[in-house]
Image (tube, rainbow, N blue to C red):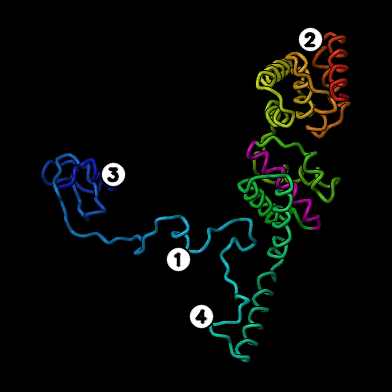
Amino acid sequence: MKNLSEVKKNSTYKNIQRCPECGGKNIIIDHTRGDTICADCGLVINDDLLIDEGPEWRAFTHDEERERSRVGSPTTYLLPDKGLSTSIGKTNRDIFGHPLQPKNRAQIYRLRKLQIRTIVYDSVAKNLSKALPEISRVASQLRISRNVQKTAAMIYRKALRKKLVRGRKIETMATAAIYLACRLHRIPRSLDDFEEAALDKKSLRYYVRLMLRNLNLQFPRPKTKDFIPGLANQLSISVETQKRAIEIIEVIEELGIVGGKSPIGLAAAALYIASILTGARRTQKEIAKAANITEVTIRNRYQEIVRKLKIKIDPGVLRNRYHSSLGRSRR
């Protein structure tokens, strides 16, 4: 007889009856043997064979399991029909691989054409057939994960149901949906990053505000310190400098300096100050390029933070480090 601990591994607990021997309710079903057993006293209550609801085939690798499976691909919001519709293949052969007769070939051609027309006949399907590929394009350009793309597709579908897309540019609305999806997933991305991928930069900010007002969803803003790891990774800055930058951000948040200012600008300025204090200085031009902002923004935030926190930075040290780095670049 099998050990009771081994039975439990391949069993399902069900508290649907009592054991006639001890009155216990801890009843398990062993699917491998088809037995119903009391886990307290070990009595086999029922030994009738159970129906195996699993597949009749076996697979030892992931490729074999995918080839032998008889179900289709999972549904996804990145397709207009969510992947549930069928399509008539372009190969003019029957199920046995034999070529179709000319009469049947013409009939299949007409059916194929009618099916394509019926798929995009609806206005909603037409809109989604343009917007969802645009979401994939922008996400690929900005290296955004597939999970965020699915969330963006759900946001766009919700905006479409509320008729927010009517009369507006589909491509820009799709880009705004990706930006809001990044905020839902707490991915630190500024709106300036999406302006490069958007076809209409002026309307992008208006569409984002439109979705924020009309969609009943909470889109949390990215925190200032969330931008530090990404910037530090691009600039090859050490962990010590990152920690110092985060400490600076936490202090200015307590003082209330962050109100009304761009998080990416404050993060870039804090990282610039931390790089000076730790001796791993990066120029304002390098940090501005990595953060996709102007040097003037970093300079203004830098001066404000230094003045509020009373950080003393020797200008001679900056000048000497600048000239030494300039000399190394010339050599």
* Extent of the magenta region: 167-186
Q: CA distance from mark 3 to mark 1?
A: 28 Å
Badge 1 or badge 2: first in the primary sequence: 1
What residue sits right under mark 3 in the picture?
9
Q: Is residue 52 above or below residue 299?
A: below
Camera-near label (4 vs 3) is: 4
Viewer-proximal residue among 152 and 292: 292
The verdict on residue 173 being magenta is yes
Q: Are marks 2 and 4 in contact (CB under 8 Å)?
A: no
The image shows residue 255 at horizontal and vertical percentages of: 73, 15
The image shows residue 40 at horizontal and vertical percentages of: 17, 39
Viewer-proximal residue among 162 and 310: 310
- Prevailing secondary structure of the magenta residues: helix
Badge 4 or badge 3: first in the primary sequence: 3
Q: Residues within 10 Å of mark 3 (few under 14, many from 20)?
A: few
Please name the residue shown 80% across and 38% down the image: 192
Q: Secondary structure at mark 1?
A: loop
Q: Secondary structure at mark 2?
A: loop
